[in-house]
Amino acid sequence: MSSKGTSSGLDFSTIIASSVHDMKNSIQLLLGTLDEVIDELPVDEKSHTRVLRAEAEGRRINDQLIQLLTLYKMSNTQHCLQIDEHCVDEFLEEINSENHPLLSLRGIELTVRCEEGLVWFFDRELLKGVVNNLITNAQQHTRNRIALSAVVHEKKLRLSVSDNGPGFPHSMLKHGDAADEVLPGDVNTRSGGTGLGLYFSTTIAQLHKNRNVCGYLENSNEGVDGGACCTIVLP
Amino acid sequence: MALWTLKNTKILVVDDFAEMRSMLRSMLRAYGAEDIKQASNGEDAIDKIEQTPFDIILCDYNLGDGKDGQQVLEEARYRAILPLATTFIMVTAENTSTMVMGAIDHQPDAYLSKPITKTTLQTRLKKILDKKNYTKQVAIAFDKKEYSKASKLCDEMMADPSAPHQELQNLKFNLLTTTGDYEAAEALCNQVLAERDVPWAQLGLVKVYFSQQKYYEAKELLDGIIANNGDFVAAYDWLSRVQKKLGNTTAAEEALTQAVERSPKSLQRQRELSELAVINDNHTLAERACRDAMLIGKYSVLRSPEDYVNYSSSLVKNNKGKEALRVAENIKHAFKGDNGARLQAEICKSTVHQELGNDAKAEAAMNSALELYQKSGVLGSSSAGLALARNCLKYGREKEADAIIKDIAKNNHENKAVLEEISQTYEDAGFAGKAEEAITAAIDEIAEINNEGVRLINEGKILESIELFKEAARALPRNHIISLNAAHSYILLMKKNGANRQHINEAMRYLDAVKDIDSARKRYNSLMKSCREVAQQAGL
């Protein structure tokens, strides 16, 4: 991936920028239209679920597009974070209200626990992608509960996604520095996916730096009823 | 389901894509909005903003051809048609960071990236409006130049734990630097930075050092910031300024090149780069930067005929005389009805023709320029004036040249670079002795005004001294000694009789004119301090 000229002489990063612009417009229209359809459909209608599902996939495409773009920018050593002060409880509420409809149809209860008015510094879009990733992961393993929670501990924000499934296998219980070694292509034994999601989440956490301290990801089996708990720790 | 409502809120939606506008409109309507106007391009947006004071403006950054969202914001702020109470939200396609955008001077209240869904609208828009409510009053007091009041408001609000502390601290920092209280500004930055690397505070410290002429300290800080974050555009901007002050014009050019690579669409940045390229005799870069400045300026309210003149002369340097002439011709079309621009156009044409050896045409253009100058009595800048003077000397209009140069010398009697250029101009034309004569006369004249002013002050005739300096400043608007003395007289008057808002504003206006002048910096800082003190005593 290089930003230098392509064979046509056009700058590749210019192509990316304008194509992202177009895609974002499409996603905006797609999600907006689906929102309208959802409002028009009676909740008990079967297609209501299908549209919810389509909307969730639309958001996933958006999250992945952002991830892809972030990784591209990183490979060009471009700056890719927009760290601002955000209200954590509202941030989690936003994620909750987007994920809640579909999860509840699947019989999964999503809860949020966060002190009101808690503020922290992070890149909202990217962190949202990370949390959504973790929720997608959790919903494949949970029995019926996913809990989002956030606290500030020792001047770091600890944002956790836990479930009440069987928990991580022993080999997945690494954290801190060990997470540095995660590479795309590593098979994520928990989700059976490509591991790109994990790689991305780890990278985003590490990109959140403050006063020479980096963020990281922590896995434990201290979730709901001994289930998996994945915590993003941000300085 | 909406916990809050946009009822009775005037909203403007700006997007070049019709479907996008209607989608946003229907989303806003779901939250009770009724009064929603729309604009499909930057020009249209400016017209609408001029007609109606909106509460919220949702403006896409990318608006196709013409002005972009940033230019809409800049123009609206510059022309003062955007009420401070209006919340301006920039809608972007990607997670664009202000750091990369490099939009330091004209930041929107918030950036929202697409897709904007009903949920984002509900959570984010409400938050943005809340934040605006906190900062609005401070901003309004700030705008009215009620600095102590604004500062007090800031402090009061910060006591509220749910207030947006970052925003308020940033505002407070701007207040402190505007009133020249650098010690307090520095302390504030350090206080913020002890907790967290916040970009505005990092850069704030740099600005404080810069204002105190601590350029080495500023450079050290900037090197650290850039090492940590190589895409901090504004840091490169400041590094360039600092390097220039340190006399490292090559390093200054390099730093600014880094900034331009990351964020090319800034008129100011391209101008600064072209200036450095000219100083460094980097003709290729100068041509490119001048051209870009001209092109970016096309849709900007900050555009100036000088962008065309500079581009034209960079083309001459690269032996592209014909193109240079075309650019000079274009000034008239680009700035229809602007007499100052016509004058610049004629001077520019005259210079290019002379370079091309078309003496008759050069002389004709010079005559038109002289005619325009005699009618208005105003020269755009000292460089335009010197260009005209050079042509006058070449084509036997010595008397006119002398008059122009005399005016320039008086306006710049302490500006070494300009005085050197004056000497060079006369020397090139074979009148070596004349420069000294003109410069000495100018220095004497200014000295006389200053001595007279000091005499009046010593005799306690402060009002008379104000009149004297005001009059002199009208005639010599670019002479910073005169400006400083005018401000000084106002401050003495306030020390004697107590401060009032009008006198503070007058003093600040004169001080503002010299705040970027190196040699005036010390006196500027100390006069700002006195100004602050008299204002505080009067509770202003």
Image: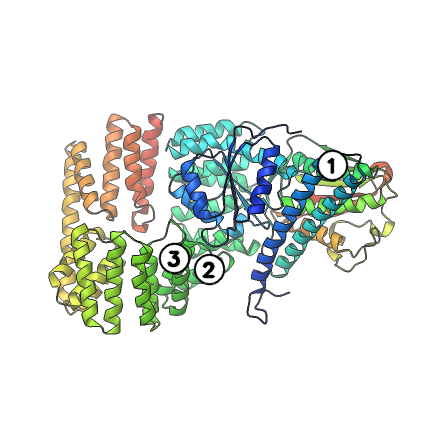
Q: Can residue B390 be seen in this view?
A: no
Query: Mark 2 falls within which chain?
Result: B
| Amino acid type, callout 1 | Leu
- Pick the quarter of the image with the C terminus of chain A: top right
Name the foreground residue: A70 vs B308: B308
**Which tag, 3 or 2, sits closer to the chain's start?**
2
- Pick the quarter of the image with the N terminus of chain A: bottom right
Name the foreground residue: A39 vs A175: A39
Q: Where is residue B142 in the image (x, y as percent from the top left)?
A: 41, 34
Q: Residue B255 carries which label?
A: 2
For residue B292, side relative to residue B157 (left or right): left
Q: Nearer the viewer, mark 2 or mark 1?
A: 1
| Tags 3 and 2 on a common chain | yes
Q: Residue at the location (42% across, 32% down)?
A: B140
Q: Residue B271 carries which label?
A: 3
| Amino acid type, callout 2 | Ala
